[in-house]
Amino acid sequence: MRFASVIVPLALAALPSLRSAPPWQTEAPLPRAVGGHAAALLGPTLWIAGGSFWSEERKWLDDTVRRRDSAAPGAWETVAKIPGGFAHGGSVQAGQALWLVGGLDDRGPSPAVRRINLRTGRVETVAALPEARVYCGAAVLDGALWVIGGSTSEMDFSRTSATVWKIDLATHTVQAQPAAGPASINPLVLTLKGELHVLPGGTWSAEKQRLEAPAEVEIFSPRTGRWTRRALPTALPRGLSGTALDAHRAVLAGGVERRDTGSAIGSGVWLYDARGGGLTPQGALPGPRLAAAMLTADRGAVLLLGGEDGPRRRVATVWRRAGETGGEP
């Protein structure tokens, strides 16, 4: 385990969704309570990599890659180590690989681009960004890993970057894109409708000296090379967890809500439809969650793994929500 320094921390109507959202069921927990970790699902095998946790008033980074088979839900196997650890970076699964980009390691914000083989567990550092990037978002589109938002500093959110990096998955070539993207902390980046949809991270307000949640989703089209903005029909928390259900829709959950008394971790759940920007409430999680990993499983089921439920509090819970009964609208 590694030590890390402390972080203060429609044009188209909404399409039919779950008339009554299925309840969230509790499954066997993670081997450790972590937040800001990466997760993947390949067949019946669930993978967890890295994350941060608190112990004896210190924040630590997990440097392990673990897996378990659905046939043995309580039996986690440690299969590899991540040099220096990993937490609070971009992560995304592409086929039989789990990609980790940036984040924190034992030296602070990292520029590393790593690939975990989901057959063998082997961890490789295959490239490096031109600068370190922590609290960034990532997604795979058109054979490339796209890295959006994040900061060069662990503590100074005014140093958030709008540079978008594109990493070719075959050659591992890193290129800065000409069009600037959203400069935000912990943006949720999803590939939907052949585009990148960036849902609210936190945008630094110099006037208020705090992170604010944008009121828009920012969309990048690889066909035009341009970003567009679409107003959200309702305000969302910043720092959401999310996962795509299919080519058009995604489930969003948790995040940090702005309230009259300050900010708090939320438990809301929404269905987002990229075809018209529809945003439909889907009830609530069993409890508040931030920095949790979210995956789509078989038959449209959704898994929410670990995360934070309060300051300096990590959890090991695994929640599952069954898929929709009516299929895709």
Image (tube, helix red, strand yellow):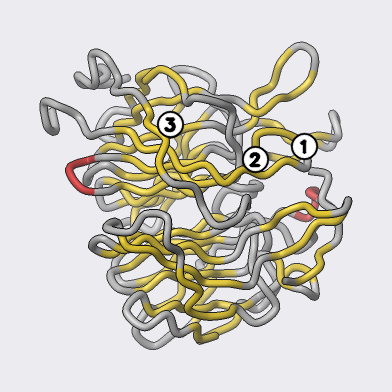
x and y, in percent, of residue 70 in the image? 29, 56
| Residue 35 appears anywhere in the view | no
Please tell me how crowded label 2 is: few (under 14), some (14-19), or many (20+) other residues with Cα within 10 Å: many
Q: Amino acid at mark 1?
A: Pro
Mark with earlier residue (1, 3):
3
Q: CA distance from mark 1 to mark 2?
A: 7 Å
Using the image as rendered, state which of residue 54 and residue 72 is in the foreground: 72
Reply above or below: 202 against 110. Answer: above
- Name the image quarter holding the N terminus: bottom right
Which image quarter: residue 16?
top left
Secondary structure at badge 3 equals strand
Q: CA distance from mark 2 to mark 3?
A: 29 Å
The residue that disc 2 covers is 308
48 displayed left or right of 192? right
The residue that disc 3 covers is 230
Secondary structure at badge 2 equals strand
Discs 1, 2 touching: Cβ within 8 Å: yes
Q: Amino acid at mark 2?
A: Glu
Which image quarter: residue 326?
top left
Q: Amino acid at mark 3?
A: Arg
Secondary structure at badge 1 equals loop
Mark with earlier residue (2, 3):
3
Reply above or below: 97 against 204. Answer: below
